[in-house]
Amino acid sequence: MVFKKMLAALGVGGPSVDTVLASPSVQPGGKLTGQVHIKGGDRDTQIEYVSLGLVTRVEVESGDSEYSKNVEFHRIHVAGAFTLPAGSTQALPFTLEIPWETPITSIYGQHLHGMTMGVHTELSVAKAVDKTDLDAVAIQPLPIHAAILDAFLRLGFRFSRADLERGHIYTVQQTLPFYQEIEFYPSPAYSGRIRQLEVTFVTSPTGVDIVLEFDKRGFLGSSHDSFSRYHVRHDEVGSKDWTSVVDGWIRQAADKHGSFGGHAPHQGHGRRGGIGMGGVAAGVAGGVVGGMLLGEAFEEVGEAVDMDFDF
């Protein structure tokens, strides 16, 4: 009897969990639906709760060092306490609302290099090892995101990679504890004045704040950052020539000196400087952006969650 209790505490012969998504693709502000499938083990099991959470990888700056960690930034409870009979099966339906600020991970059907996103399922088992499941999710751009990103590509900018930085953006209303930076190589027209461009979207139900960070070339190879911020509404997406609008933003930023009066708009900013060399996109070709390589899988234990990071 003692041996059986020890095995149960280790999870041997216990229940299993598998989450099935109706679709693994969703936009910010949208909903993921599906079912959590639970199968009973060798004995009746007391389940404490079933929860789902969105998990992603975030860059963290700590003193002079920098590291990445997995962070669960949104969670829902699917079910409370119940008894799961031995050998029985249950399917628990769920709807997971996606926060508006959730970062983009996929563009034109291609995974954005550097991004990871998953739905983490936790089956909390009383007096035993909890059971978990992790399913990859693709966060597609909203129409306004796609229009602006497409404009950069049409102007000759090329995708490099993307990442998430812990912190908040100066003067921007932000609810999540991190923000996304989508990095571009400069177009030939601006390569003599700009080293790199980073685009940040902070999205709400009514619109999106766009923060542009330019690493600008200076005298004798020096560089300095220039920041610009714009706000557009979702209902403006079909009413403007976004290539012309974005070109105007870039020209204005390229001519600026000493933007923001020395205030750093990114509070808790992680990385400055050079761009990673992998995953260069070649621009728009037949409506598909090439070269955005598959993001790395999660590699370590997340914050306050225990996960298997191989999707």
Image (spheres, rainbow, N blue to C red):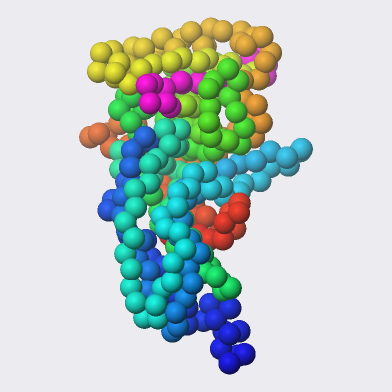
Residue 105 placed where, x, y %? 41, 41
Residue at the image position 61 percent from the left and 84 percent from the top: 6
Q: Which residues are magenta?
A: 203-222
> Viewed as shown, does residue 38 lie left or right of 190?
left
Q: Is residue 136 above or below residue 7?
A: above
Q: Quadrant of residue 218?
A: top right
Inspect this view and state whether residue 74 appears.
yes
Q: In the rendered view, does 91 fall on the left or right side of 170?
A: left
Considering depth in this image, is 88 or 206 the residue closer to the camera? Answer: 88
* Residue 117 x/y as whole percent: 45, 48
Image quadrant containing the C terminus:
bottom left
| Residue at left offset 46%, top offset 21% | 210
In the rendered structure, the answer to whether residue 16 lies left or right of residue 25 reads right
Residue 4: image x %, image y %? 56, 88
The residue closer to the viewer here, 202 or 274, is 202
Residue closer to the observer: 21 or 270: 21
Quadrant the N terminus occupies: bottom right
Dividing the picture into quadrants, the one containing residue 2 is bottom right
Q: Residue furthest bottom?
A: 1
Q: Could you tell me what secondary structure mostly forms the magenta stretch?
A: strand
What percent of the width, then of the height, locates residue 168?
A: 60, 28
Residue 114 included in the magenta stretch of the image:
no
Residue farthest along the left direction in this orientation: 286
Give the farthest residue toward the right. Answer: 63
Say whether residue 290 is visible.
no
- Please, is residue 135 above or below residue 2 in the view? above
Q: Is residue 57 above or below residue 166?
A: below
Say above or below: 135 vs 290. below
**Does the segment drawn in magenta span residue 217?**
yes
Residue under the point 53% across and 61% down: 307
Q: Residue furthest front?
A: 82
Q: Residue sitting at 33 percent across and 73 percent down?
A: 89
